[in-house]
Image (spheres, rainbow, N blue to C red):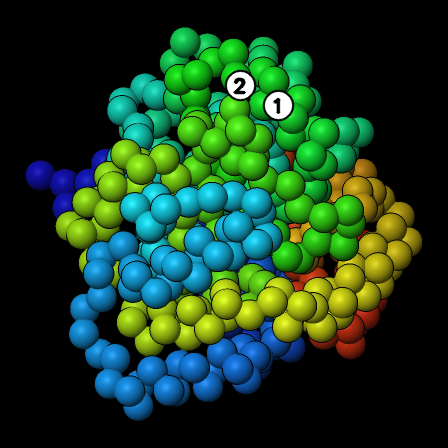
Amino acid sequence: MQLLSDRILNMSTSATLAMAAKARELRGEGKDIIGLSLGEPDFKVPDFIREAAIQAINDGYNSYTPVDGYGELKEAIITKFKRDNKLSYTPSQIVVSTGAKQCLANIAGVMLNEGDEVLLPCPYWVSYSDIVKLYDGVPIEVKTSIDTDFKMTAEQLEAAITPKTKMIWFSSPCNPSGSVYSETELRALADVLVKHPNIYVVSDEIYEHINYGQGHASMAAFEDMYNNTITVNGVSKAFAMTGWRIGFIGAPEKIARACNKMQGQMTSGANCIAQRAVITALNESPSRVQYMIDEFKERRDLILSLVNDIQGFKANTPVGAFYVFPDVTYFFGKTLKGHKINNASDFSLYLLEEALVATVTGDAFGNPNCIRISYAASKEQIIEAIKRIKAAVS
Ligand code: PMP
Ligand code: GLU
């Protein structure tokens, strides 16, 4: 009998985490790697949040929490949804999980049956496709291109829907393209979806605050989409709390209850100290973390001008998140310093070996023409990394 399940053998390793591990390993060997592969803010967790965590430890918070999160945290999430997104939820519609990643896994686990199709506008976040497959769903890629700023149009959505379509998952701001759907663009998608009341939307809004454009729009804020939308969010990005592992959903009550049940068998409630700290984080005005967004915007402007200055790189202008996603097809078929480049994976690997810069291949995000470069790094690192990349490809 085989040792490992088909389930795990059929799963791809997370390309973002794999590249980060590889960069760490090479650094351990003494190589001067600049890591632009992982989407992880390089800021310290703001003082007021750290103090709340220390206070929680000293106040003796150490027991299991309610599976779906402390009541006080759910109240803070409800306040946040109302304040920032004009969304009204009751406590039974909120589930707190160990990162937005667990929120997504819960949703797939409680909603998918074998063969159910999940539409993934490409490029999509790396883990969507494998989470869907893990729960026997079928990811259906909806291709977009740089010409539409990597956004799916209403026509494309309509054409991709079949009787088996169960859900659509997307992130706005988008990881990896940085594209942000305006309210008008979301409404156009909603106009298609309202004709298909059995289809549910997973609106991943984890980069909500990291937006340099006209502001954030939430799918669930449309009255006719509210009952068909699960809003996913968390504190990893805006509050630089990646390792604290807190994410949350606002969802139709039946779905939230099912996620609670699933989590009760899988992991129980999320970490108690982190939950206490997040109460403080969410009750504060988002303006407390604006300094990080301002800095990310400066880095976006910097990296975009540097990247577009390299012959063969063609990038859209990211409006949110902290990634650039240049098309690098110009290099396919070419030989660079003895390395044959056939695709984006070859190119990303070449940059790691030759320029000592870690990026992620676009294949991992459902777009084989691009690579993802994270600019959640200092300006000095960004300047040095792009200088090295330019030297390696010219
Ligand atoms: N969704 C997107 C689009 C992301 O980029 C990430 C990054 N990790 C996640 C979800 C998961 O976030 P978390 O750290 O809360 O699990
Ligand atoms: N979301 C980040 C990224 O896309 C973190 C890595 C991960 O969770 O896979 O790089």
- Position of 29 compared to 338: left or right? left
Q: Is mark 2 within 8 Å of ligand 1?
A: no
Q: Amino acid at mark 2?
A: Leu
- Position of 242 compared to 153: left or right? left
Q: Please state the total of marks drawn on the protein image.
A: 2
Q: Which residue is mark 2?
A: 193
CA gap between label 1 and label 2 equals: 6 Å
Asked whether residue 130 is in view, the answer is no
Q: Is residue 107 above or below residue 278?
A: above
Q: Position of residue 283 (x, y in %)?
A: 50, 67
Quadrant for the N terminus, please: top left
Quadrant for the C terminus, please: bottom right
Q: Is residue 142 above or below residue 77?
A: above
Q: Nearer the viewer, residue 392 or 141?
A: 141
Asked whether residue 72 is in view, the answer is yes
CB under 8 Å between callouts 1 and 2? yes
Residue 178's disc number? none
- Element under disc 1: helix
Q: Position of residue 127 (x, y in %)?
A: 45, 44
- Element under disc 2: helix
How many residues crowd mark 2 within 10 Å: few (<14), some (14–19), many (20+)?
A: many
Q: Residue at x 31, y 37 (%)?
A: 253
Q: Examine the image and state in which quarter residue 370 appears.
A: top right
Q: Residue at x 50, y 65 (%)?
A: 282
- Position of 123 compared to 147: left or right? left
Q: Which residue is mark 1?
A: 189
Q: Residue at x 19, y 41 (%)?
A: 5
How many residues crowd mark 1 within 10 Å: few (<14), some (14–19), many (20+)?
A: some
Q: Residue at x 39, y 59 (%)?
A: 75
Q: Position of residue 285 (x, y in %)?
A: 60, 67
